[in-house]
Amino acid sequence: MAPHWFQILLALADHDLHGLAITKEVFDRTGGQMQLWPGMLYGALRKMTIAGLVVETKAPPGFESGGGRPRFYRITALGRRTCAAEAERLASFVDAARAKKLLKA
Amino acid sequence: MKEFIFRVAIWACPAAIRLEYASEMEEVFFHCVRTESARRRGVSRLLIWPRGIWDLLMFAASVRREWQEPARAQSGGRSGLSRMYRSMKMRPQDVRAVARLARKQPFFSSAVVLMLALGLGASTAIFSVVYGVLLKPLPFPEPDRIVQVWGSLPARQLANLSLTAANFWDMRDWNRAFEELGALHGASFTLTGEGMSPERVSGARVSVGFFRALAVQPVAGRLFAAGEDDPGALAERVILANSLWRQRFGGDPGIVGRTILLDNTPYAVVGVLPAGTPWLDTADVFVPFIRRADADRDSWEYVGIGRIKPGITYDAAFADLERVARELEARYPANKGMGATMAPSSTWVASDQLRQTLWILLGAVGLLLLIACVNVTNLLLARAAARHRESAVRTALGATRADLARERLTESMMFSIAGAVLGLLLALGILQFLTTVGPVGIPRLSEVTLNGWVFAFAVGVTLLVGVLTGVAPALHAPVAHVMTAMRQGQRGSVGDRRQDRTRSLFVGAEVAIALTLLVGAGLLVRSLAQVLTVDRGFQTERRLLLTISIPSAYGEERMASTVRNILTRLDTLPELVSSAAVSGRPLSRGSTGLGLAAADRPDMPDSAVPWASWRIVTKDYFKTMGLSLLAGRGFTEQDLIGKPWRTIISKRAADVLWPGQNPIGRTAILWKGQNESKGEVIGVVADMRERGLESDPTIAVYFPAYGAMATTTLQLVMQTKGQPEDAVPAVRTAVSSIDPGLPISSIRTLDDVVTTSVATRRFTMTLLVTFAGLALFLALAGVYGVLSYSIARRTQEIGVRLALGAEHGRVLRSTILRGLRPVLVGIAIGLGLSFWLSGFMTSLLFGVTASDAGTYVAVTLALVVTAVLSCYIPARQVLRVDPVIALRAE
């Protein structure tokens, strides 16, 4: 899975978000290492919607932003499983690195 | 503006996607731009926008790929027009094909992109300068209602005189057309404060109406209020200019209400001006110009600025001003013959000469861009010809003309987009260079930036270039004569010859344009050479200028004794050959003038009275400046000014007053038409171009400084033994040994002053020479390209001729001549074009005429020689042709 797909799923794992919020969260969580430019973000979200990993939802009531009410995205059960599988895959690499004493336990 | 760029980029997406996502994507996009600019430093910040636009384009491409199949299925049912539109739109497979080709021919592609970038970059940068300097509105609201008001003396053909104090106040009271009328007068002060060294600052006295006429808003505090210039008002108030406020007071708004010391007098700070130019930066401190009952009506010193009432036309305001001038003339004898003129505020932006310079430069880069486009078209045409057979094969296999044309268009569009991106970076670089090293004297140059208009201009030009360079090769896409084209080998055919003609035509055009630019550049080079070698009258080597400020609080007596002591002390310095004081620096703007007449020629009509500039000098001034005394004697300390009036005049003045006669001992009438003092001419000195190297030598009148030594601004000129800079410490020590508190300022060498005075001219010349050089290079590249291409295709023909017994030398000659044919045609056209266009730059020339034969001959020769060379290099190939191999290649 492409790293930015994983990061988007991770951002959506515990709450529904709109595009800008996803970009902000990913940027902060990765310490500025991943900047999701709009084309990358919405390109990925379109494809992930087609793949059934996320669905579009309505903005929660009471939400107001500068540009009106943007689309919110919610992670699907499939998305959640895919994300968890990817996280496990990545975690296994980290374990391997630990086993080889590259990282402290 | 930024939103505009985003919206242009998002247009790459299909409409449906755009409508659905644009606003959200815009939000995310600018969030990314903000966070990235906060994070990145230095050059990498330049990459933020390209990164973002690349992201959008990739998104658009991926969406389009997704949509491709369904769209193609639908198009069968559409109308013809929409099908045609659809068929001409760029397709990803075309883009890929072009990218593949570009990779295969890196030299060709980079040459095309570089040429476009050069043309676009240079024209965008110069357009930015033209916009920033000439077209950008002034920083005042409704600038078309603002005018500058002048006095005039129509009988002596003098317009644009400053106003006298009394006339200004009367004009303000009597006019009916102006909402506000204000005046400004230059001054200077010594600014002191706790823990700061005394600093000389420029000041201005302004009436209340001055800033009101400009309608400026203060950034802190207030401006002068009504009544603050009335007789008896408090003079000790000051408004700070923005730059002084930032540099000296750290931009602290709390300065308002505090006091600062000017010439040791406390002034209350009432406000701070915004940054900007003109006027807002003419001085560091602005103090009120207070009306006095006995205001002076003889001394013309005030700049007048007015704001016309809404609804009143410029002409009506001018008529009203003239009425006031007539009333003044009728009422006061001192105003005899005086009129008034005014000029719109647009003239502040740039002098006529600068305006013309910039338009000429813009025209020059326009021509350069044209040459670049023609060259690129030529290259693409050559390549299209080389792919003739490939196109024919594809046509045979079912490609339509639209398919082929679309691919060519895609190709040229991609090149122009790449050229535009590179060109924009180049433009940024050029602008950076121009604004940091550009000459002083171009107003607002330092504020010039690449802005929205300029970007739109670049985009427009790019699209135009893309279409233009795409159309010509596209029209050559073969359809009708597929069979002929397929059969067509390397041998010349009808179609080939037609192409050769097109390309030769283009080369001819390039040469014509390049010649025009070269002539323009050549004329400017000759002008600068003339300016620098013109007889200036004075010497500039080892000459030093500086100003010593003496506090007015010293009083007449002490000021005069300080000046005398300084001059005596300087005479003893071993570092100096001689030194002198003068009332006005040479080559500085503004000078003092008077009407001059001969007492023994009373018949001279008023209109013939020459206007002379006058200077007050000490005895060694002429020696120090290197002006030779032609007749009579110089000043001595016994010549007291005005007791009686004795004067030394310049040679020109002598020639005007007493042509062919000895002027020594004759009586001149000074201030003719005003107080008409009579003065004895005791000497004649050589002429000097003291208003600038490009102005005629002034008609000059000199008075002795003795008896009027008290001054607050002592201007000194010195001739030094060694390097002028080396004498500065000794002068400093000498001055502080007399009075340690005196600030020394404006230390310049005369060489430096002269260099600065021609800086704008040198700047224009350098730019035009660069453009002309690039144009020549591009044109020669075109000549080279066309000839080497045609030789490559004629190898067999040449082989046949050699086999039949032609000599190598003969073939070489005829080949070169063939290459030169379009060059010669281009030169003929170019000469005509130059004759016509150089007429527009007459005002920029000095010492040469626009039809200067020498320049035309030199430039033409240079062009012919370089063209022969660029024909010879490819033509040499014919010498290497072996008839046997050439024929076998069939």
Image: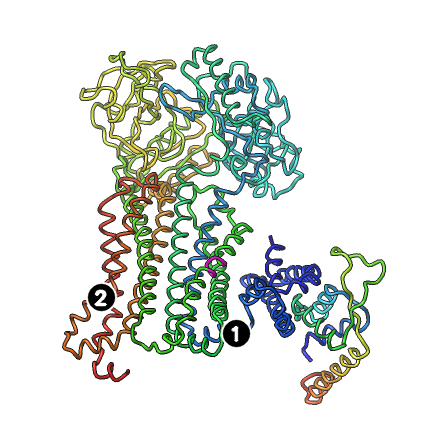
Q: Position of residue B355 (x, y in %)?
A: 42, 40
* Between B166 and B261, the one nearer to me in the picture: B166
Please tell me whether residue B315 is drawn above or below residue B328 in the rendered image. below
* Between B888 and B411, the one nearer to me in the picture: B888
Please tell me whether residue B813 is drawn above or below residue B536 in the rendered image. below
Magenta segment, prevailing SS (helix, strand or loop) = helix
**1 or 2: tag closer to the N-terminus:** 1
Q: At 19% from the left edge and 67% from the top edge, which residue is drawn?
A: B814
Q: Is residue B22 left or right of residue B800?
A: right
Q: Is residue B143 left or right of residue B761?
A: right
Residue B744 included in the magenta stretch of the image: no
| Disc 1: which residue | B96
Please tell me whether residue B517 is drawn above or below residue B315 in the rendered image. below
Q: Is residue B114 left or right of residue B219?
A: left
Q: At 34% from the left edge and 36% from the top edge, which residue is drawn?
A: B692
Q: Quadrant of residue B776?
A: bottom left
Chain letter of disc 2 in the image: B
Q: Quadrant of residue B676?
A: top left
Q: What residue range appears in magenta?
A: B463-467
Amino acid type at mark 2? Ile
Q: Residues within 10 Å of mark 2 (few under 14, many from 20)?
A: many
* Between B117 and B67, the one nearer to me in the picture: B67
Tag of residue B83:
none
Label 1, label 2: how many angstroms apart (C-alpha)?
A: 40 Å
Amino acid type at mark 1? Arg
Please tell me whether residue B694 is drawn above or below residue B75 in the rendered image. above
Q: Position of residue A97 (x, y in %)?
A: 69, 86
Q: At 38% from the left edge and 60% from the top edge, which residue is drawn?
A: B374
Tags 1 and 2 in contact by the CB under 8 Å rule?
A: no
Q: Position of residue A71 (x, y in %)?
A: 76, 64
Quadrant of the image containing the C terminus of chain B: bottom left
| Disc 2: which residue | B816
